[in-house]
Image: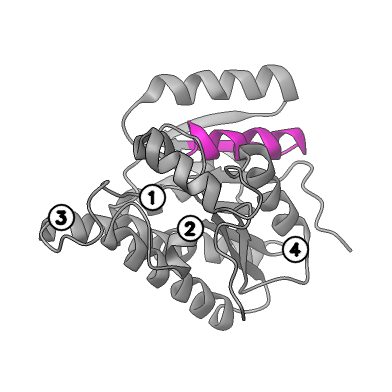
């Protein structure tokens, strides 16, 4: 039987713009109350919260926090529980990269590699660790969804550090799903090229090349990608899986 999303409490990290904002709209449309995490720019988060409340008649709150800081990850979960009265779904959408030459081993500093690992891997661990006690108390458990990337299953991406940490993130997801019991379903969505503020930093030439490389000869549609999170949240028989939504940019043979 599908997991009903009506009246659920959802935390979305990196939720104020781009894919995160579209995910927030999709869950609000299902009747969920939403906590929108942002790192620095409060205005888009507040505007989105207002939009969700007016259009979908749900409760929406904003929470500032750096998802590369473990204490902030924990606090985001705690503030969601306080503001919304509980937590049912956590979507670890925040990520970090620096657009660099993939071949250049000096393109990123040690501090930048550490930041990439902190946000993309350690932060996800911290989010689930903070939410898990509540998930276990919930009658129907909880859902943890990670925004990963096809960069985690291919030798490409905005930087080598991003590709490496996204691969580590996927392994973490599987380890968590395999060990944390029957009260939590844990999966990852792997978008391809998204034409968000971040994606557009590739530049016109690289964007055209990536669209052409995809089997469907197009970018990943933002709405289609966000729909995948709703699908995974509702499906009670999927855990420990990678769901690629990439217009056929990276088709694996196994």
Q: Give how far apart the Cα atoms at labels 1 and 2 are.
A: 10 Å
Residue holding disc 3:
108
**What range is drawn magenta here?**
15-36
| Tag 1 secondary structure | loop
> Is residue 54 depicted above or below 151 in this figure?
above
| Tag 2 secondary structure | loop
Residue 199 located left or right of residue 132: left
| Earlier sequence position, callout 4 versus callout 2 | 4
| Residue 44 position within the rendered picture, expressed as x and y whole percent measured from the top left | 45, 22
- Front of the two marks 1 and 3: 3
In the image, 157 versus 174, the foreground residue is: 157
| Tag 3 secondary structure | loop
Q: Give how far apart the Cα atoms at labels 4 and 2 are.
A: 28 Å
Q: Quadrant of the C terminus?
A: bottom right
| Earlier sequence position, callout 3 versus callout 2 | 3
> Is residue 220 depicted above or below 233 in this figure?
above
Tell me whether circle 3 and circle 4 mark residues in contact (CB < 8 Å).
no
Residue 203 located left or right of residue 189: left
The image quadrant of residue 39 is top left
In the image, 123 versus 142, the foreground residue is: 123
Q: Is residue 8 magenta?
A: no
Q: Is residue 64 visible?
A: no
Residue holding disc 1:
95
Q: Residue furthest right?
A: 1
Residue holding disc 2:
149
- Front of the two marks 3 and 4: 3
Residue holding disc 4:
140
| Earlier sequence position, callout 1 versus callout 3 | 1
| Tag 4 secondary structure | loop
Disc sitting over residue 234 in the figure: none
| Residue 179 position within the rendered picture, expressed as x and y whole percent measured from the top left | 54, 83
- Front of the two marks 1 and 4: 1
């Amino acid at each position: 039987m599908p997991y009903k999303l009506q009246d659920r409490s959802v935390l979305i990290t990196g939720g104020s713009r781009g894919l995160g904002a579209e995910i927030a709209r999709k869950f609000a449309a299902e009747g969920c109350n939403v906590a929108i995490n942002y790192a620095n720019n409060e205005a888009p988060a507040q505007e989105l919260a207002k939009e969700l409340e007016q259009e979908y008649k749900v409760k929406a709150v904003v929470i500032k926090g750096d998802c590369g800081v473990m204490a902030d990850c924990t606090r985001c979960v705690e503030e969601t529980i306080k503001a919304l009265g509980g937590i049912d779904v956590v979507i670890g959408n925040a990520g970090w990269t620096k657009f660099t030459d993939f071949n250049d081993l000096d393109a990123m500093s040690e501090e930048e590699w550490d930041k990439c690992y902190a946000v993309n891997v350690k932060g996800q661990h911290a989010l689930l660790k903070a939410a898990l006690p509540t998930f276990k108390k919930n009658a129907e458990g909880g859902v943890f969804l990670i925004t990963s990337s096809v960069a985690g299953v291919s030798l490409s991406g905005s930087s080598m550090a991003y590709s490496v940490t996204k691969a580590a993130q996927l392994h973490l997801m599987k380890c968590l799903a395999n060990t944390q019991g029957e009260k939590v379903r844990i999966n990852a969505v792997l978008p391809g090229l998204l034409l968000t503020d971040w994606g557009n930093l590739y530049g016109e030439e690289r964007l055209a090349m990536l669209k052409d490389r995809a089997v469907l000869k197009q970018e990943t549609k933002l709405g289609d990608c966000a729909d995948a999170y709703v699908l995974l949240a509702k499906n009670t028989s999927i855990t420990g899986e990678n769901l690629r939504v990439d217009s056929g940019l990276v088709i694996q043979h196994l």
